[in-house]
Amino acid sequence: MSHHVTPTPTLYRGRFAPSPTGPLHFGSLVSALASYLDAKKHQGCWIIRIEDVDGTRCKPVFAEQILETLNSYQLFSDEPVRTQSHHTDTYEQHLQHLKDQHQAFPCNCTRQSLAQSAGNHPLECDSTTAEPHSWRLKPSDLVYQYKDEIQGTLVFTDDLKNNSPVLKRKDGYFSYQIAVVVDDHLQNINHLVRGADLIETTAQQLHLYHLFGWTPPSICHIPLITNDVGDKISKQNHAKAIPNGDLPTLLRALHYLKIDLNQPKNIHEALTLAIKAWNPSQLTGIQSSPLEEQDLPLI
Ligand SMILES: [Zn+2]
């Protein structure tokens, strides 16, 4: 008698995690589509998460608008949408874990004092007793490397040496860095597909995974959509909201993912065809794509 053990296949779990600091813009739609298409190509689960830890910039009304826009493009979360601001206790517990490991330290440096050290936090900070203070991640000599399906093998040598990212701000809000790592782990996210602007945050995130003893997801970075002077299009540089449920907008967004469809009837058909056509290797090595002229009025 023999036992046949069939290993349980690991279900692909991906996510799109917008910050509600404004309505969804064209660049965010491209990112949402990339993560969605990759998940669906792998018969995976795709989740939307609202990253609103920064209570000074995020507004619930924008979260509602973003969800409405995503739904109008038939991009539905396969699980209930997680809202980060509802989970600050969780981030506090994980920050405490880092404090216990002496991997986080208090800091009350000012913008002015940091300007003198060229924006990097000084290696030593003597403000341990002063209140109020922020919490920062301790620098590290560790070198991280991972294989990005689109960008190739990325090696981060000095990224953690002179850098002490804020984990919790003076005003009590948690940083994106800690919240994103904790949530991706708690939600069992095992694939990240996101914009190339986030490459620079990757070493810090891999380091947090290491300190928590967790396995990081596989990560790949799609080209960033830039304006005519090479800046990322974003809410900060006045990218306008995109119209809801607009097939031509969807087709233009797919074009930046190297998917050009031949006159699909509707959004549903376009998404179905796009899942079949999705091939991230066609984006290999591209870190940014300038907006083409016909798309400029969009933003
Ligand atoms: Zn400091």
Image: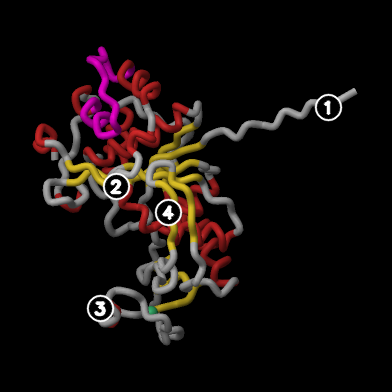
Which residue is labeled 4 in the image?
A: 154
Which residue appears at 53% of the width and 34% of the height? 12
- Specify the label residue 236 is tagged with: none
Which residue is labeled 1 in the image?
A: 3
Classify the position of ligand 1 by quadrant: top left, top right, bottom left or bottom right: bottom left
Horizontal and vertical percent for residue 229? 12, 51
Q: Is residue 58 left or right of residue 233?
A: right
Q: Is residue 133 left or right of residue 181?
A: left
Which of the two residues, 147 or 23, is positioned nearer the viewer here? 147
Is disc 4 in contact with disc 2, using a CB cutoff of under 8 Å? no
Dot 4 or dot 2: first in sequence order is 4
Which of the two residues, 131 or 219, is positioned nearer the viewer here? 219
Is disc 4 in contact with disc 3, using a CB cutoff of under 8 Å? no
Dot 1 or dot 2: first in sequence order is 1
The span from disc 4 to disc 3 (Cα, nearest Å) is 29 Å
Which of the two residues, 94 or 274, is positioned nearer the viewer here? 274
Horizontal and vertical percent for residue 217? 51, 46
Is residue 139 shown above or below 27? below
Horizontal and vertical percent for residue 265? 25, 12
Task: Say whether residue 264 is magenta.
Answer: yes
Is disc 1 in contact with disc 3, using a CB cutoff of under 8 Å? no
